[in-house]
Image: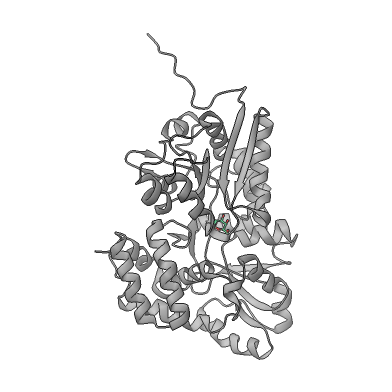
Amino acid sequence: MLLAVSPVVQAKGLSGDLEIFSWWAGDEGPALQALIDKYNEENPGVKVINATVTGGSGVNAKAVLKTRMLGGEPPDSFQVHAGQELIGTWVEADRMEDLTPLFKEQGWMDVFPEGLIKNIGTKDGIWSVPVNIHRSNVIWYSPEKLQEWGVQPPATWDEFFAVAPELQEKGIVPLALAQNWTANHLWESVALASMGPEKWDALWAGELAFDSAEGVAAWELFGKVLEYTNKDASSLSWQQATDMVVDGRAAFNVMGDWAAGYMSTTKKLVPGSGFGWAASPGTTGEFMFLADSFGLPKGVKNRDNAMAWLAILGSREGSDAFNPLKGSISARKDSELGLYNNYGKSAAVDFSKNIIVGSLAHGVTANEGFMNDFASVMEMFLKSRNAETAAKAAQQIAVKNGISK
Ligand code: GAL
C-alpha cells in the first residue's frame, strides 16, 4: 500500500505572518526586498514581517537573535552564515530543524556544490538554505582616481607599501578602514596573504597554532598595513569606508563583495569604470568565501510559511533575483550568468577556478564563541599593536573555543 506523503512545502493558500530576521537593512535592503517580492507574488495571503537590525556583518543582529532564541521567541527564519556560525552555534545547541526533506523535495542535493552542503550539514542533517556566495578578499578602487594619481592596484602588500607613502603625501588615505569588524575582515585577507591557503586551513583544523611563527607574522604584517589606514576608522560603517574610495578620499578598501552591490545597486556605479577590483594583495588565485543562508529554528510560529520562504531562497529564480543586486553570486550551480554585471561574472569565474578557503569574519571557520573573543583580541591589538601578544591571545581563545588543543 502506498502511503500519501505530505509535501514539505504546502502548494497554495498560505495565510498569517512570516517573520524573517536579518541585518540587511537600509543600503543592504534591496536584494532582500527582491526575495520578499517573489514570496509575496506566490503567497499573497501571507504578511511578511521584515525584521532587520542594522549593523554590518550582523554585529548587532546576532546579539538580538541570541536573546530571542534563548528566550524561546525565535523568528520564523533568520540569516546565518554557512559554516561554524551555524553548525558550531545553533545546530550544536539543537535549536534548528533538519531541512533534508526540503532539499530532497526541491531537488537541491545536486544543485548546490558538495563543499557548500558540507558547510551547512552534519551527519544528522542539513541545517540551512544558502542564498549566495560572497567573496571576502577583494580590494576596491576607483579606476579614474588611480589613473589621476598614477597608481596601479597592488598585487602584493609590498607593492602597496611602495605606493602608500606617496598617497599619504598627497593627502589621500592609502587604505580606508571602518569599525572593529572590518578590521577582522581586513585581518583575514592579510593573514591569508601572509601564510597562504594551506596554513590558513591548518589554523582552523587545529593543526597550526595561532601563536606559531606564521601566526605572529600575520599580525606583524597586519600591523604594518594598519599604519596606512584612517584614524577615524572605529566610527565609520563599512559603507562610509567604501564612500571614501568612491569620493577619492582613500585609494583602496578591502571589503567583501557586498561593496560591489552597494556601489552598483545603491550608488549606480558601473563595475569596471565606476569602480574597480582585484583579489586583495597577495591572494591572487585564492577565493575566501562565505555564504549567507537562512534556517528554520525549532518551535517557530509560522512553520509552513517559513518552509515556503526557504523554497524561494533556494530556487534558481529567487537566487538570480537576489544576487545580482547583492554583489554576490548564486550558490547554485545552474545560475543564469547573463543576469549578472561584470563584477558578478568575474567572481563566478574566479569561484570556479580559484583555491577556495573559508572566511573567519563571516562565520565559515569558527563558531560565535571564537568570533566574539576574536573581536576583543582585535580591540586589544588595535590599541597595543603588539603582534606576539595578539597571537598568544588568539591561541588562548582557539583552545577555549575548541579549535586548537
Ligand atoms: C556579511 C554578510 C553580507 C553583508 C555583510 C555586510 O557578514 O554575509 O551579506 O551583509 O556582512 O553587512
Decide if residue 202 is on the left or right side of residue 405. right
Please give the name of the residue rendered at 44% of the width and 40% of the height, measured from the top-left corner.
72
Q: Quadrant of the N terminus?
A: top left
- Percent x, y for residue 45? 66, 27
Decide if residue 254 is on the left or right side of residue 248. left
- Percent x, y for residue 16? 61, 28
Please give the name of the residue rendered at 53% of the width and 27% of the height, measured from the top-left corner.
9
Above or below — where is 369 with respect to 108?
below
Is there any visible trace of residue 336 in the rendered image? no
Tell which quarter ligand 1 is in.
Answer: bottom right
Decide if residue 182 is on the left or right side of residue 320. left
Above or below — where is 215 with respect to 264?
below
Decide if residue 233 is on the left or right side of residue 403. right
- Percent x, y for residue 286? 47, 64
Please give the name of the residue rendered at 52% of the width and 70% of the height, measured from the top-left corner.
180
Please give the name of the residue rendered at 37% of the width and 77% of the height, measured from the top-left corner.
390
The foreground one among 380 and 64 is 64
The foreground one among 186 and 58 is 58
Is there any visible trace of residue 248 in the rendered image? yes
Query: Residue lying farthest top?
Result: 1
Above or below — where is 40 with respect to 230?
above
Q: Quadrant of the C terminus?
A: bottom left
Query: Residue lying farthest left?
Result: 405
Above or below — where is 188 with respect to 66?
below
The foreground one among 48 and 219 is 48
- Percent x, y for residue 239? 65, 65
